[in-house]
Amino acid sequence: MKCLFLLCLCLVPIVVFSSTFTSQNPINLPSESPLPKPVLDTNGKELNRNSSYRIISTFWGALGGDVYLGESPNSDAPCPDGIFRYNSDVGHSGTPVRFIPLSTNIVEDQIMNIQFNIPTVKLCVSYTIWKVGNFNALLRTMLLETGGTIGQADSSYFKIVKSSSLGYNLLYCPSTPILCPLCPDDPFCAKVGVVPQNGKRRLALVNNHPLDVYFQQV
């Protein structure tokens, strides 16, 4: 009986210490990573890789304008290979695109390909896939153009991220920074914006003022 009493006295400090440690020094278990957010269209629906969308500006009038496929100045490509934005949202509809993610769903901050989804001849199929061209010394940036490849780690990878103001931004994210001297941010992505070229608005890599866009299902 005396031994049992002494054993209980020995266990009391352990119980008190355990209770004090648990209440004052809780063990923080690592939380699960947040689920990626789906990219939504103008109707609030998740983008579908099998559907077509127009990339439209978040602004109206002269500040607006859809993204479209057009002919690049001084280009020797056999098909239109320039990616532009109309100078206004009046009277013009953009060229439909489809988004081709590396996984099943289209979510924010995910690598994907972008392709103009239009009928075309066999010669021009590759001239529907977005990519970023070489450095343009005159405009001092890299211009967006077509002629890319799907699923290849070259200059054809982009991301959609939430804008700090309205809508979404497009990012160019090559697999290696050597392909993009204008990609200072981790993980080597650059913002897509607009630069003037021969009276048109050409999509290009920019340091400031990225293009804020919505996605409208066709």
Image (cartoon, helix red, strand yellow):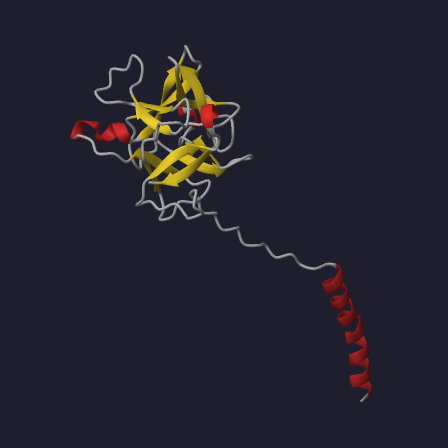
Q: Looking at the image, which residue sits at the far bottom?
A: 1
Q: Residue at x 67, y 59 (%)?
A: 27
Residue 102's spot in the image, x, y percent? Answer: 35, 43
- Residue 214 to residue 138: above or below: below
Decide if residue 156 is on the left or right side of residue 124. right
Asked which quadrant contains residue 159, the reply is top left
Locate the C terminus and report the quarter of the image it occupies: top left
Q: Residue at x 41, y 28 (%)?
A: 89
Q: Residue furthest front?
A: 91
Residue 151 quadrant: top left
Q: Is residue 200 visible?
A: yes
Instruction: From the viewer's perspective, tell me whether residue 129 is left or right of residue 21.
Output: left
The percent position of residue 182, horizontal first and vertical second, equals 46, 22
Number of numbered discs visible in the structure rendering: 0
Q: Quadrant of the N terminus?
A: bottom right
Q: Is residue 83 left or right of residue 11?
A: left
Instruction: Answer whether residue 155 is visible to the viewer in this image.
Output: no
Residue furthest top as drawn: 138
Q: Position of residue 8 (x, y in %)?
A: 79, 80
Q: Nearer the viewer, residue 149 or 99?
A: 99
Above or below — where is 8 with respect to 21? below
Q: Image point 42% across, 48% down: which residue?
A: 45
